[in-house]
Amino acid sequence: MAERIDFQTEPARYRHWKLKFDGEVAELVMDVDENAGLFDGYQLKLNSYDLGVDIELNDAIQRLRFEHPEVKVVVLKSGKDRVFCAGANIRMLAGSTHTHKVNFCKFTNETRNSMEDASRHSGQKYICAVRGTAAGGGYELALATDHIILADDGNSTVALPELPLLAVLPGTGGLTRVTDKRKVRRDLADAFCTIEEGVKGARAVKWRLVDQVVANSKFEQTVKDTAKKLAAQSDRPSGAAGIRLTPIERKLDDKSVSYSCVRIDIERDARRATITIQGPAAAPPASAEAMVAEGAAFWPLRLARELDDAILHLRLNEPEIGVLIFKSQGEPAQVLAFDAFLEANKTHWLAREVLHYWKRALKRIDLTSRSLVALIEPGSCFAGTLAEIIFACDRSFMLIGSFQGDNRVPATITLSPANFGTYTMSNDLSRLATRFLGEPESLEKAKAGIGKPLEAEASEELGLVTTALDYIDWDDEVRIFLEERASFSADGLTGMEANLRFAGPETMETKIFGRLTAWQNWIFQRPNAAGAEGALKRYGTGVKANFNPERV
Amino acid sequence: MPETTNVDYSTKIPNNVGLTDDQRVLKALEQWHPGYIDWWMTMGPEGFQTSDVYLRTAVSIDPKGWAKFDYVKMPEYRWGILLAPRQEDRQVNFGVHKGEKAWQEVPGEYRAMLRRLIVIQGDTEPASVEQQRHLGKTAPSLYDMRNLFQVNVEEGRHLWAMVYLLQKYFGKDGREEAEGLLQRRSGDADKPRMLGAFNEATPDWLSFFMFTFFTDRDGKMQLESLAQSGFDPLSRTCRFMLTEEAHHMFVGETGVGRTIERTCQAMKEAGIEDPYDIAAVRKLGVIDLPTIQKKANLHFSLSLDLFGSEVSTNAANYYNSGLKGRFQETRIEDDHELTKASYPVSKLVDGQVKMIDEPALTAINMRLRDDYVADCAKGVDRWNKVIEKAGVNFRLKLPHVAFHRHIGEFQNAKATPEGQILSDAEWSKKKDQWIPSTSDGDFIASLMTPCWERGKFAPWISAPKVGIDNKAGDFEYVKIHQA
Ligand SMILES: [Fe+2]
Ligand SMILES: [Fe+2]
């Protein structure tokens, strides 16, 4: 794990996926190169995947939305003969640290959610054409699509064999999507999850595991017809040209990563990193066309991409950095001008994509298992969209007035309509609605403050920040908070924060990231799976696992 | 008495497993029976269902004299359930359960694995009948026609054998799988048979002989390893099937041998010394030896694919669980657990074929394949004796295991019959030298004219040394009544 994991790629560099375009339908073909695993020690046989495969998938899904507004339906299929996808590579899992496994699962979950997000919010539907076996993560990929077509050839099956085969759970939303999305009856779901070889043919339809089974000879045509039908329902523009997601510019060294409008500074001894966000340098473009012309340089898009990359980098490459400090620099009025621009153009396809991307990037912050803290100081621009970062944090500190010898005006927070529903969390509520779950009047008061620059004491009064401090107390209070945070158990903090962040209703996403992931992470640690005689360790050797029968 | 060495013909389904006392299974099999007959009528030998064929039928499971010969119309053949005699105190002889009493019922935890093994084996049996169904029309003699039909009815019986296990031991799932075995069709785009070689065409009689030599021999190896199973009913079933399988391989080996013999004889008579003078040899109306080599290359490589991946978790699980052993497991001298042993596996490393030691448990398929290759080589030697005896300067060879493969280590490589790795371009240029081309196929097809006269043989094949059941040369093995 010495090497840095890079989340940036592009189709020309893909090893495992192919994108094919035919008007409003695109094919996303999984054809994993078994010798191109991210790490040594395993081969990605039978279209099994590791993080490297999923990084490309994530990139492809993202590009389909931004670079291909004309694509209304994506057909997910396999490039291999008798196998659709065998799921996450088991030897990779068996050889990975617990930390890597958890981060891997989280990222793959986020990627599958982004497929569903494209379908639900962006008119880009996914069809899964399953020929061959779709097992474990392979079936979970299918589950993330809108419509699953299974070949009726006696060989093609869907399966969640994790329990019987590996003594673990399907870790990418499988159980949740089976019961909550496909609404498979619980006893049938129970049977399904214990049948190692899976279910095929008519029974797969009867149990609602797939939408249809089709004879081989009619398979291609059925997929085509279904794609056409779904495309007709899409509200994506016909004939619009996309923008190119050009490579992100980054400079890395041991202590920092700098992007065009994000900078990470790492204090390794203190195990914390400061993420500083740079506000826009110019006013928003004059029109939607001008925004398209700016393409990937359009500030909100550029910032979202850089912030997303920064968070992923910290998650995978800096596991010992326990606290992330968010700061910002810039002109709040300009941030708000971009919010107003996006709001005014929200029916334009690109503005819509940018807004949904911000929603996903913010969710990624919500789901990052580090202590998150916002420091709001003079010169900052936590307004509108950027204020969401404060609300994503576990704690926030805002300076009252100015530091000594600093003649800048005091820091403010300005809310915009974007803070009230544009960027929903996994629980389908806005961050402010979640924050004020028990005090609806506070939410109303905050709403009344839209557009007003709120200084520290007013922000504290409205409940938008945890603590307002003047310069006399600032250094000490912030230092003590950070030192205390560093002294707690990392595991305890991860559990506590994850529980406190998502108040309110359960959704499929919260269940996946909360319930399913927590169970999985527990099972991954238990000897029955991960012990020397556990199922994960013994998989592939032919020697049986030795289970401790005690129920906990 | 539920189990005997003699076959009970009082039931609709002849058996030695006490079906009369097992009403549940008898009923299930009787329900399956019409579907089977339906399959046989539509997919069995085409055009000869009303002919009288001189077939052997099992009357006992005693290795001596288990069969009797008589004329039978194939749809009236008494397909039955025949298991080798039960051995008292038989044990699981390998894997983690070694030393335990052999299982008479399916252990719950292995139910899915065992069912899969049985279904895969079962699927091959009707598949070959389907592949061979058009061959009767072009039979080179009544003798060969009978042999074809004997093989066909016995493959049908092997299907029965597997279906019995499914019906008796695997409940509702087993019944569904038994149905599935009648639904799939060799070469069908929608419902193909499960394994590759069983979806290939068997277009001519040389293919049929090659198939019974190479592919039925894979069947033999699979049955040999299932005969070692700790699940006793499977073991006993396979042991009896092996007695029938021997005849199938005999048909293959002697069929190819007689083809070679006739070619050499014709060459000598015409004074052709160069076996590579293909045009001259073909003019004689016999199949030239290089083309026979190409056919062998093709069938050998397709049959190797049936052994699966050289390194296989499934195979390791089957072995460790005591479900599927090695060839002649009990005669091998080791610990029969293999948790510490290793076994050399041929692999493609940096563009070269190398032997790499792998944990023996995961290399079970490789080991069985090695035993298979050795078994094939003996047969090829006997063919070479025929060529040698005729004084023709030619030797048939088994191609390298890397040649023309679609499964396992070499599936993405192109290799010569000697095992040298080639580029895709070189392969496309040269492959017609190594596997039969369309024109080779057309030439063989042109020789496939029927010869149904008693005691006569098509000009491309020699007569056998002895007749079936010691019958005289002009015996009427099939009384043809064409429907
Ligand atoms: Fe057979
Ligand atoms: Fe056979």
Image: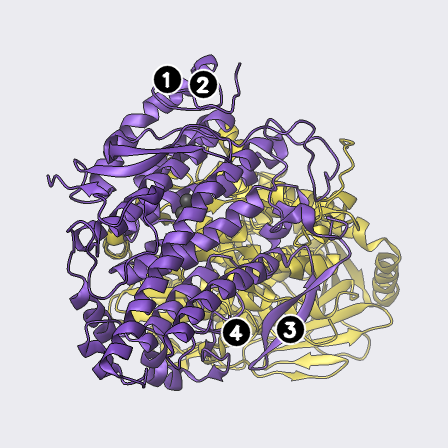
Chain colours: A yellow, B purple
Comparing B437 with B208, the one in front is B208
Q: Are marks 4 and 2 in contact (CB under 8 Å)?
A: no
Whether the residue under disc 2 has CB within 8 Å of ligand 1: no
* Circle 1: residue type: Thr
* Circle 3: residue type: Met
Task: Name the residue tied to disc 3.
Answer: B355
In the rendered view of the protein, which quadrant contains the C terminus of chain A?
Answer: top right
Q: Closer to the observer: label 4 or label 1? A: 1
Task: Name the residue tied to disc 2.
Answer: B19
Residue A226 bears which disc, if any?
none
- Secondary structure found at label 1: loop
- Secondary structure found at label 2: helix
Task: Indicate which disc, 1 or 2, sits on the residue closer to the N terminus.
Answer: 1
Q: Are both tags, 4 and 2, on one chain?
A: no
Task: Name the residue tied to disc 4.
Answer: A334
The answer for which chain carries disc 2 is B
Q: CA distance from mark 4 to mark 2?
A: 87 Å
Task: Indicate which disc, 1 or 3, sits on the residue closer to the N terminus.
Answer: 1
- Secondary structure found at label 4: helix
How many other residues sit within 10 Å of disc 1, few (<14), some (14-19) or many (≥20)? few
* Circle 2: residue type: Leu
Where on the picture, by quarter, is residue B278? Answer: bottom left
The answer for which chain carries disc 4 is A
- Ligand 1 position by quadrant: top left
Q: Are marks 3 and 2 in contact (CB under 8 Å)?
A: no
Residue B11 bears which disc, if any?
1
